[in-house]
Amino acid sequence: MRIRPEKVAHLMRREVAEILQQKLRDPRVSAMRHELGPRLGLREVPEVRFVHDDSLERGARVEDLLKRLHDGRPVEDEEPE
């Protein structure tokens, strides 16, 4: 029986979160794939990539801009990156 990629991705996210929360003491440890294989019942574990999510920072910036507008304070232009 073949497991769909979406289901594997979901299971991997769940297990990686549990491993990071409960088992790893050093976040630089790259042995996580050895832990994932038996947990997921897979012979080959797909590559695990961590991507920075800056949505909280962007949301806070939007909230600050809206508050400034509501309070009648000036809104500074951002410097282009």
Image: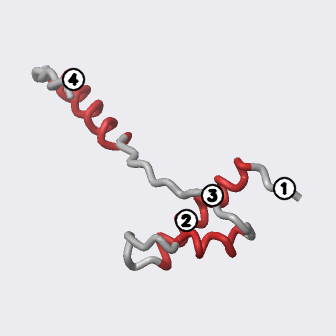
Q: What residue is shown at x 65% (from left), y 63% (from top)?
A: 45
In the image, 67: left or right of 72? right
Vertical position of residue 60 compared to residue 29: above or below: above
Q: Which label's residue is closer to the chain start, 4 or 3?
A: 3
Residue 30 percent across, percent down from the top left: 46, 70
**Residue 74 circle label:** none
- Separation of disc 1 and disc 4 at Cα? 55 Å
- Separation of disc 2 and disc 3 at Cα? 12 Å
Vertical position of residue 8 compared to residue 80: above or below: below
Q: What residue is shown at x 73% (from left), y 68% (from top)?
A: 43
Q: Which label's residue is closer to the chain start, 1 or 4?
A: 1
Q: In which quadrant of the rendered view does residue 75 lie?
A: top left
What amino acid does circle 3 point to? Pro
Q: Secondary structure at mark 4?
A: helix
Vertical position of residue 19 compared to residue 12: above or below: below
- Separation of disc 1 and disc 3 at Cα? 14 Å
| 10 Å crowding of disc 1: few (<14), some (14-19), many (20+) | few
